[in-house]
Image (cartoon, rainbow, N blue to C red):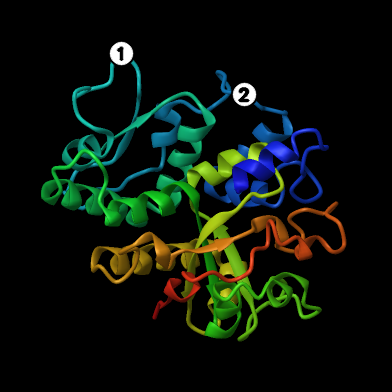
Amino acid sequence: MADALNKSTTQRPPVHLGPEPWQPVTAELEKWLPGFLSMSEAGLKEPNDALPSADRLNQGFDYRNNNGKVLQFVPQDASLPFFHMAYEERIWHHGLIATRNNWHDFFNALVWRTFPRIKSALNTIHWRQMQHHESPSRSARRDAVTLFDECGIIVLGESPAPLHDIRKHRWESVFASAKNPWQHRTGPQALRAITFGHAMFEKYLRPYEGLTAKSALLCVPAGFIQQLDTNYAAAIHWLDQRLAGAILHDEFLCHSQELAPLPVLGIPGWWLNRPRDFWRNSRYFRPPSQRTGERKIYVLS
């Protein structure tokens, strides 16, 4: 359906996220890699020499994966070591993250730099599953972690109530409520979204009506959202550790239906020029389905 919507809107003016084409994600990415804001303001639209090299991306990146290997970005070109290995296999055995000179891999590198423990947990799940499933097709567990890795968005709430609204597709409460849970500083109605999937960031370059992420609905301790707004680095560090642990202990991302679809253009402030009754578009803001009950709200404590 998203593809159909994309095709049906190709003649329309491009969607802009916030006051500038890349907002509000630009500010977040600036926290992940200082200097990104100046890159986006320069109007970079296609891969070129202005994208950071692997050496630049390695600066300040000092982590080991769950196999004890030092993680580092390496160019995916003729010099790529262990070229016969699969992408996830190379990361597990050697810590080498193959990186091409394009937006997709650049955004992937930024997510690795910001959430190294979650990304390492996803790589660990891939490796474990590869040992038990000899079929060339991915297992259901690998499908889940891949979907989150590519198209995931983390939605944080200090109470299950607003997360249940997303789970149940109560779009008026989620997006059109006068209380606006996305603007609450803290408290049981507050919500925050952090894009995780690197493919989502790439889609933000040319957003379209129908743009939908797969959300990990996480209930966090009281006061965490205020900490996220005031001490971002500490909050992200905690989130990275706790969600990675949940994934590694098979408590989360066991199957893809745990992730709830989130039509991200509905988030207040993300698309300033949207129609007033935009959230009533049932092609985009879909009604609940039979699988709605499988969506998971995971409690981080």
Residue nearest the viewer, comparing 130 with 75: 130
Which amino acid is tagged 2? Glu
Q: Looking at this rendering, what residue extends furthest in the front direction?
A: 290
Tell me the crowding category of disc 2: few under 14, some 14 to 19, or many 20 or more residues within 10 angstroms, Cα based.
few
238 shown above or below 52: below
- Compared across the picture, whether 2 is left or right of 236 comes to right
8 shown above or below 115: above
Q: What residue is pinned by disc 2?
A: 46
Q: What residue is pinned by disc 1?
A: 78
- Please identify the quadrant where the C terminus is shown: bottom left
Q: Cβ–Cβ below 8 Å for labels 2 and 1?
A: no
79 shown above or below 146: above
Name the quadrant containing residue 226.
bottom right
Residue 77 is at least partly visible in this image: yes
Number of numbered discs: 2
Instruction: Compare marks 2 and 1 and give the one earlier in the sequence.
Output: 2
- On the image, the x and y values in percent for residue 122 come to 31, 53
- Compared across the picture, whether 157 is left or right of 124 comes to right
- On the image, the x and y values in percent for residue 200 come to 55, 46
Cα–Cα gap, marks 2 and 1: 22 Å
Name the quadrant containing residue 37.
top right
Question: Considering the numbered disc 1 on the image, is that residue within a helix, a strand or a loop?
Answer: loop
Q: Looking at this rendering, what residue extends furthest in the top direction?
A: 78
238 shown above or below 128: below
